[in-house]
Image (spheres, grey):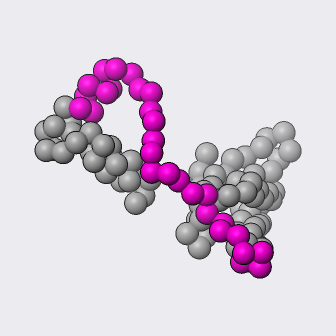
Amino acid sequence: MSHMEHRGYRARVEFDPEDDLFVGHVAGIADGVGFHSDTVPGLRAAFIEAVDDYLATCERIGKRPDRGASGRLMLRIDPEVHARALRAAEIAGTSLNRWGEKVISDAAGG
């Protein structure tokens, strides 16, 4: 699995061997937007067109394109991982929430 980026939007890309196609789905938007092609250049063009068309449609109908987030995140993780994260936050001199926010932000490219 890989990804593409255009105008701040990213897409997850996979290859479908059954249909012999590259298939992509735009992430982080309010609606499901997909695209496909049998070539890499075609896939990039389809992705750009899908993002541009989606944004134009949202603007035309007055809809916010981005999926909102509340800022609250509940995770269930292995207790040993939780304990290691608590220690890492303490060593960093911060709360687990602040430490986790930084780790997630760094991992998400923020």
x 34%, y 20%: residue: 79
Q: In this view, does 23 lie above or below 41?
A: above
Give the camera-side residue of 98 and 22: 98
Side (left or right) of 33 relative to 75: right
Which residues are drawn in magenta? 59-86
Give the camera-side residue of 107 and 87: 87
Q: Can you give x and y, in whole percent of width and height, for residue 14 in the image? A: 69, 47
Side (left or right) of 67 relative to 102: right
Quarter holding the N terminus is top right
Q: Can you give x and y, in whole percent of width and height, for residue 9 in the image? A: 59, 65
Q: Does residue 99 appear in this view? A: yes
Q: Can you give x and y, in whole percent of width and height, for residue 98 in the image? A: 28, 47
x 40%, y 60%: residue: 110
Side (left or right) of 40 relative to 70: right
Q: Which residue lies furthest to the top in this view?
A: 79
Q: Is residue 42 above or below residue 86?
A: below
Quarter of the image holding residue 19? top right
x 27%, y 45%: residue: 99
Q: Does residue 52 appear in this view? A: no
Q: Is residue 92 above or below residue 47?
A: above
Whether residue 66 is in magenta: the answer is yes
Side (left or right) of 107 relative to 87: right
Q: Can you give x and y, in whole percent of width and height, for residue 11 in the image? A: 63, 57
Give the camera-side residue of 47 and 92: 92
Quarter of the image holding residue 72? top left
Q: Main secondary structure of the magenta part?
A: loop
